[in-house]
Amino acid sequence: MKKFIGCFFTTVVAFNSFAQVNEQDKASKLVAKMTLEEKIKLVVGMGMSLPGAGGAGSGPAVGQTMNKVPGAAGTTFAISRLGIPTIVLADGPAGLRIQPIRDSASKKRYYCTAFPVGTLLASSWDTVMVKKVGEAMGNEVREYGTDIFLAPALNIQRNPLGGRNFEYYSEDPVVSGNIAAAMVNGIESNHVGASIKHYAANNQETNRNLVNTISSERALREIYLRGFEIAVKKSQPWTVMSSYNKINGTYTSQDYDLLTTILRKEWGFKGLVMTDWFGGNDAVAQMKAGNDLLMPGTQKQNEAITAAIKDGSLDIKVLDDNAARVVSMILTSPAYRKVSYSDAPSLKAHAGVARAAAAEGMILLKNELNTLPLKKEIKKIAVFGNISYDFISGGTGSGDVNEAYTISLIDGLLNAGIQVDYDLKKTYEKFIITEKEKAPKKKFFFELPAPLPEMQLEENMIAAKAKETDIALITIGRNAGEFQDRKEENDYYLSEQENNLVKKVSEAFHLQNKKVVVILNIGGVIDVTSWRESADAILLAWQGGQEGGNAVTDILSGKVTPSGKLPTTFPVSYKDEVSSKNFPGKNLSAEPLKGIGGFSLGYDSEVTYEEGIYVGYRYYTSFNVKTAYPFGYGLSYTDFEYSPVKLSTATFKGKITASVTIKNTGKASGKEVVQLYITAPSGKLHKPSMELKAFAKTKLLQTGQSQTLNFEINEKDLASFETESSSWVADAGNYIIKIGASSENILQTAGFNVPLPIIVEKCNKALVPKVIINELKK
């Protein structure tokens, strides 16, 4: 049997990483030939038009060659006399976001593929598959003439109500970092750049431009920075994007410790740092911090840097270093290499990648009496819920994609030749058209449209459908996006209309001894405990991109055996989530502040991460808090058997390998996600009950087939961050490796000993909070 290495794969840095010595030397020589004005324009973007704001920001509405890729997020300054072109930066992370219509008189469209959202990709726990998605995304970036793709996003899903959680991967940094690294390596295999974001602790949308995140050094190092550290070391992305928020009183884009001390000096990052769009409030401080490129760029920033150089408050060497990193990036770009682009990527092939990836990450939460896959005797299906006919492909804002189509659930069923109740279909489609005509039009690209009211059906109609059809499918949908976090009422919790729909349909179909399946077309965690007993099966479909309905049908029909596992915990109640006590923080100003274009930036505010390191499953397992569905959970149509764990040694000597063999003992082919947790001994520091350290996904195993997975654990995997010494330390004592199918379903264990404490890594004192934090301790 061929052995398989888990997610702690040997790092393969993208081929076109621009951190090569010759490019750096060439960049420095080019900067030496520039005028002061050219250097400053190079580190300040070319501006952008603000859609719906009635004008542009302080920079030009359309910058130099901005029209090369209409709808892109921004461009850099070109210096023609030195052979330095402008490069184009465009949004992600669920697919390239550009303008599909360039000439209203032409029928030609420039669509992009809407891939599954980040949370769904992470739910696959499959770095090989995610790399393939990245390869397809990167191909579209290149073929549409773009140089830098503003993705992936890997902030921690600290709270279920986070408005951009759909873009992010997980509540756990090991999942986030490894999935992000795979995505970057896939994107950059096309010789275009990726930008991992939003660095760091950008875990909410409420007051995101002004909020001060107050966190301990340990929580930052172990939770909020760790995923970025993994991604940087395993993929060396071209760029890192700093976030909007402050950390312990300093804007991240203006924090030298964050951008230079930690990112460059400690982690060895060789690339460029750019701001998020209009991030921070001090261009000179951003230059000093090592934020090389200010995006999208404003005239005010240009003037501030010019004045600082002239009065001596900004050293010209700092500007030269920043400009050199911008030039290094440009020298590696498709624009500099004069790569031809087609404006015609293989959208059909990429749709196939999107469909396969979506099915790979969907999670079967419940399946009583093998309700799924659909049985052959089922001839006709009643499909309920607005969203069944109007699927949500992904979230809004910069994470949106202009795709050619979205396959809904009803489309997917019909494409598979499955018969549905056409009268019910016509009723819903007519209702949706009518309600959409009433809805107000979006004013801004990032505006979240109000959800349509759930159509209310008469009980006698539902009863009739229960007699006429063989099974009921109900889809519940949720959407979110930039600038606002979600709410508890009618969002985290189902609305009264939705509850009534689930209750009435379930009662009517169960009265006829027929089953009910609920499909969740959502971007983030919602309540399930108040209604899940009504359903016989629950499929968490997340937001599967443009092929979502086909992928759901692949699961329902049994064409694909579900293998997704939760990358985030579903609590029994929102109040059980430890961060609910302080999310999204408190306002410090009486009135909201305004930004460029008159946009509201929200309130000056602060949020204290009092839970410390006890985020997600670390909290639930350490404090014995019951969950609705635990981290790592997911059902299958088959069964798997885990062999006893074999360790390479009983005494740790720099590294240790754990091996486990997985056997498919069920009746269907399938894949299994295997999770390795470690319980550390009690030492000087309080520790979570266990922490994820590695994971792997098997190949497709046929009935009776086995596969051996090997996990290599190193010193850093055993270590915790000791604030007093600013070091990663592994305590001496007995460690327990726990391998299982979820954080609450540990199937095999094995122990090993660390004879002496290990100081794994000495770090710099950085990001120290200015106030005392009453942090949660075990």
Image (spheres, grey):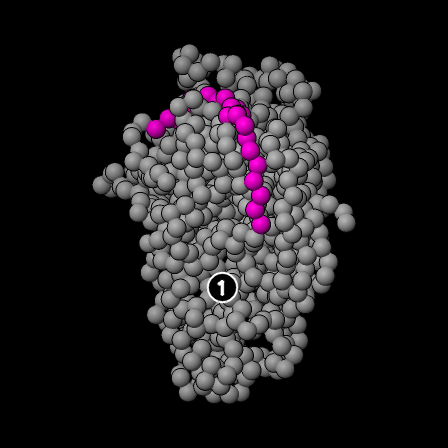
Residue 295 x/y as whole percent? 49, 34
> Does 92 appear above or below 667?
above
Which quadrant of the view contains residue 497?
A: bottom left
Q: Is residue 344 left or right of residue 100?
A: right
Q: Is residue 412 visible?
A: no
Q: Is residue 351 left or right of residue 47?
A: right
> Does 609 appear above or below 533?
above
- Determine which residue is flagged by label 1: 520
Along the line of sight, which residue is nearer the eye, 777 or 410?
777
Residue depicted at x 55% and y 30%: 754
The amino acid marked with disc number 1 is: Leu
- Look at the image and give the residue range highlighted in magenta: 748-769
Residue 505 x/y as whole percent? 44, 78
Which quadrant of the view contains residue 574?
A: bottom left
Residue depicted at x 52% and y 14%: 317
Q: Is residue 191 visible?
A: yes
Residue depicted at x 58% and y 25%: 268
